[in-house]
Amino acid sequence: MKKKTKIYIGLIGEKGSGKDTVTEFLKKLLPGKKVRHVTFSDVLSETLDLWFIPRTRANYQKLVPMMVDTFGDATLATITRRRAETLEADVICIPGMRWPADLRMVRSLNGNNSRSFVVYVTAPAKTRYLRLKKRRQKVGEDKTTFRKFMQEEKARTEMDIPKMGKKADLTIVNDGTMKDFCNTVRLKLLPLIAKK
């Protein structure tokens, strides 16, 4: 019996662009498929929790360069790949790509029984800022000023995202309603997944 092809989708995008929402849409748009995700930030969250350090955006932004500088640029990519490969799923989303090693890792997941591609999800800064304030995923995000938000965009972990986005197989601009975003995912992303 022929083994099913596993699809890996690497998601690049600025904070608040809608990377995690793509996974949620795919779960609804692909009811016959098992859709899961593994994030680069899973390891970071676990590390911060181990040290009883709050999950603030600033702490995430400090931790990543420490890991990269100490253990190499493929540190997070390596563990994320291992976690992704062990997941039982038809479609595995990997949001939060931000380093060249992440891009290499997702591209390397193309094989006999797997396909991978990269999607850049983006939106205007003001739109993303308002989403993050409302979402409150990280400690203190609801109190962040737009000026601080823009300063965070210049952090080492954030500044290469648009450049990496230019290397994506598909770009989705999420600047409208949730319904618009879902329709764009359906019209642009589903054909990539369905491609043989």
Image: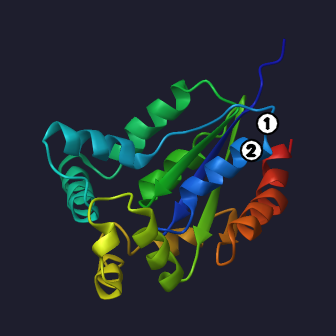
Q: Is residue 133 left or right of residue 70?
A: right
Image coordinates for residue 160, horizontal then vertical, percent = 42, 72
Q: Quadrant of residue 189?
A: bottom right
Residue 96 shows up from this direction? yes
In this rendering, the answer to whether 140 lies above or below 64 is below
Give the class, few, some or many, for how many residues have Cα within 10 Å of label 1's Cα (few <14, many ≥20). few
Q: Is residue 33 left or right of residue 173?
A: right
Q: Is residue 111 left or right of residue 156?
A: right
Secondary element at image label 1: loop
Image coordinates for residue 79, horizontal then vertical, percent = 38, 36
Q: Quadrant of residue 33?
A: top right
Q: Is residue 76 left or right of residue 193?
A: left
In this rendering, the answer to whether 70 lies above or below 86 is below
- Which of the image's four quarters has the N terminus? top right
Determine the CA span between mark 1 and mark 2.
Answer: 6 Å
* Numbered label attached to residue 28: 2
**Amino acid identity at mark 2:** Lys
Residue closest to the eye, 13 or 156 = 13
Circle 1 residue: 31
> Which residue appears at 21% of the width and 41% of the height?
49
Image coordinates for residue 111, horizontal then vertical, percent = 67, 34
